[in-house]
Amino acid sequence: MVVIDQHEYLCEEEKRLKEDKERKKYWKKWGPYVAERQWATVREDYSEDGDAWSHFSHEHARSRAFRWGEDGIAGVSDTHGLQNVAFAFWNEKDDFLKERLFGLSNPEGNHGESVKEAHFHLDNTPTHSYMKFLYKYPQKKFPYEKLVEENAKRGRDEKEYSLIDTGIFDDDRYWDIFIETAKESDSEEELLFRVTAYNRGPEPAPLHIIPHVWFRNSWSWGRNTDAKKPSIRQVGPTTAQTKHPKLGDRFFQLSPSPGIGHSGQDVQPQMIFTENETNFKKLYNGKNPQPYVKDAFHRYIVDEEKGAVNPSCRGTKSAAWYAFDEDDGVPPGECAVVRFRLSKRYDGYLDEELFDDIIEQKRNEADEFYYRVSPLPMAEDLRNIQRQAFSGMLWCKQYYHFVWDEWANGDPAMPPPPPGRKAIRNQQWKHMYLDDILSMPDSWEYPFFAAWDTAFHCIPLAMIDPEFAKKQLDVLTREWYMHPNGQLPAYEWNFGDVNPPVHAWAVFRTFKIERKMYGREDLDFLERVFQKLLLNFTWWVNRKDFDGKNVFEGGFLGLDNIGLFNRSEPLPTGGVLEQADSTGWMAFYSLSMLNIALELAKHRRTYEDIASKFFEHFVLISDAMSFRAGGEEKSLWNDEDGFYYDAISWGGPWTQQLPVRSLVGLIPLYAVLTLEPELINKFPSFKRRLNWFIENRHDVAERNIASMRRRGKDERLLLSLVSKERLEKILKRMLDETEFLASHGVRSLSKYHKDHPYSMEVNGQEFKVGYVPGDSDSGLFGGNSNWRGPIWIAVNFLLVESLLRFYMFYGDSLQIECPTGSGEYMHLGHVAEEIQHRLQHLFVRGDDGRRAVNDGNDMLDYDPHWKDYLWFYEFFDADTGRGLGASHQCGWTGLIAKLIHDTGINCRLPQTPRTPSSAAAHYFDDVFHRPSRRRPSSGKPAYIRRSSTSRSIGNRSDWNSAVNGDETPSAISRSNSIAPTEDEEQTRRRAEADQHVANYVSNQLERVKSNEVSSAFEDEFEAQLDGE
């Protein structure tokens, strides 16, 4: 439960989370776990050359059974992906059903792979008790060929050609299809689905809505031959029974839909059935073992091939076909509605009013939950952004299945894979056996886990579901993921790639966030993962410190093309690349492990010795990065430029710095930690070792510990890679708007290199790094590598935390000019806040009503059916804020939710004061209350046509705005958030909780009004004494 003002109160969603945690009810058994793209993944690639994009294409996905998972639109499944529910649509113009999202493969896109659709993750709760998905479906023929052809014509210096660029949404000729899923209050097994499709166009238009229920194919591969095959069969006019040996029996129960034509007749669903098996005849001119195959519904509905589906109404894949095509279709401004449920019980019919009431109740409970997560007053626009960021994080939870042995050697019932494919990738990861729900970086573009992405995901996830966040961090260190040598798997294209070591940081931050927000200390989690990270740390030291000098090579490190050379390959110059970022990351890793060790030592004193070990390791890394034995070797620090650079080392004194001003030189700032004197005194063994270092390694200690004799704010001790002098020099560049500081965050490469690119000629070939604010102009990493200028929220997030840690030591005594040259000086806490606000300005509306992320698109900024919906891009143009890369990268871009939580209260927005103190005064002038629902702002209220008054809910005041999407998504109605059955005691407890919320808000506003910064975050960052 969220603890506010030291008071605990469980809202309905928190009760479900508690029951799930205590294993009383398995509320997370069903969720949005169906991938948005299973085709063209490494798991489904059985080619000889490892070309996953070509081996299993979008076109093949219609007719070919997947081996390792499933995909679909707004898909829901159980935690093992056995039974799936998703949606298909048809506009009578397309050549096949819209059954899955379309996008370009990596070779097809001028900037790599990208989805070419318009869909939004509008809402989701941690237990998935309520979920909402918006798909915008064109009424004209979907421009598949045009998207492929136009992107093929474009070069790397041109923008991607997206779906909205085609003009397909002109004249509003599209459908807004809202897909809602809810769970009943007393059963985690009862799933309710409601589809509401609005005709936004000027004329009537037909629409076919075809919800699918099917089983993942687990029977065609020749394994588990004794297992009983699952089945689906029709048992009533609008009901099918599903049977699975592991899931048991369920019923797919449908309701007739209100008619849309003059006849007033209901739209009756037609149930159709087939097998989820490959159409060998179509794809390979082979023979099908039986006649009913995966693509049957396309052929039956679109091609009118009546023999395509099983006339005996049974199979492993089923669908319900709703045809809204009477009188030319749904009138403009009106909607088609489909309701059905997946249930353990067979009722024979659906009570639609009760059905709708349950969905509305779950939506209101979601409002209540998110209000408690972020109760501080903030602009509705910010609250909307945060809510959709959280939602996207939860929609990116997907089922991930991969068994190396079965994948590499093939299946008994299938032709053996080409002999050479084992050597293409991942041949050293034979131990992997993955069968989990994982947090994916992007729901379509990156439907696979990535180790360092996962670490960042867990920060916002810990705010709403710490149990899931902890499981994500824990599972990557388990023996079926982590390599026996201690390496964490990077991502499926190459598990052996090296990602930055951020896992320990995320583990401790997740532990501290749970402690702060929920009042729980999960020491077992902290200790268990720490033990595994000891193996990983040892792997880093043994494998990435080539000469044993505590200067690390690292390689790829997630920053792809940031350097002069491909850092994953041998240097064309010979020698070894000594990386400022790799060494900075390892120092950061050491301090993160030190923090955890000190926290554990409060409860288990044996960890004092381990804390001492990581303290010494940090100091030696720090010293090696800046000073070399004998004074002959050059440091990675360039005193003249005031910056850290990578260097090529040929051994001995032979080194050459590569003076590229990039994020590589800022990463050393991450390695900073403050130690409380009370904490040091609590651990005599650790204190003795620290004092020994000061006395016996005085030269090293003085260079790398920010003065043992001059303590900082509150007598703190500071461990840092950079001295105060170097910190000031680095920040002078970082906060210079002609170098790193942009209007929307910190660039990954200095703008200095726009006019001053750095180049080197090696063996007649020129290697060059120049400033590229947006999509990469380089072919490195498939052209989908973009670290030579753009803004990335994840690395900005770590910079913000580092500045706050420095502020914890220096306090108000260190004033920095921000921006450089502005004449305005501020302490580092306010510098951090300034960067947080700039990052938020990527998404929030400006004075002109535009969002920077939308790149000046009028439809996205001003259209009432678009302007409140957001895409969370992978990275952002450093000059304009335009969103780039994967468009549903709620993974690390979801960190914006945490930034809003921490500083949204005083984020500068249009019509609000600019300074923190005046902002607080502004809020004090208002009466504290929860915002009320907003009426639709323009146009005739849309309504749902009913064919019988017994099913009419059109007169409900909240119906139109709730479903139509005209309401601001973040708006909360206090009266509607209380279940009608609430008793007197519940009302009393809620009132008491509300008073504690009011006290908490008042205290936080006082903090903002007084310009106090540190107390808001100190208890999240460092190990402290209990009660501190």
Image: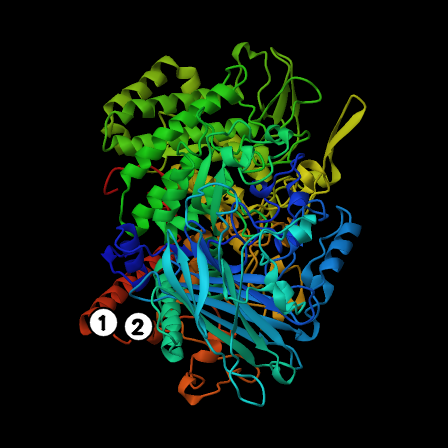
On screen, residue 740 above or below 33: above
Q: Is residue 791 shown left or right of residue 586?
A: right
Q: Which corner quadrant of the image does residue 654 belong to?
A: top right
Secondary structure state at the residue bearing disc 1:
helix
- Residue 352 or 707: which is nearer the viewer? 352
Q: Secondary structure at mark 2?
A: loop
Q: Residue 541 at what x, y percent from top left?
A: 47, 21
- Report x, y in % for residue 996: 26, 62
Pick the front one: 443 or 1000? 443
Q: Give the quadrant of the N terminus.
A: bottom left
Seen in the picture, residue 44 relative to 424 is either above or below; the reply is: below
Q: Residue at x 62, y 46 (%)?
A: 40
Do labels 2 and 1 touch, CB within 8 Å?
A: yes
Residue 722: tell me if it is visible.
Answer: no
Q: Which residue is mark 1?
A: 987
The answer to whether residue 120 is above or below residue 494 is below
Q: Amino acid at mark 1?
A: Thr
Query: Looking at the image, which residue sits at the far left?
Result: 985
Mark 2 lies on residue: 978
Whole-percent x and y of residue 1010?
Answer: 37, 55
* Front in this rendered view, residue 215 or 502: 215
Q: Residues within 10 Å of mark 2 (few under 14, many from 20)?
A: some
User: Which residue type does callout 2 highlight?
Assistant: Ile
- Callout 1: 10 Å neighbours few (<14), some, many (20+)? few
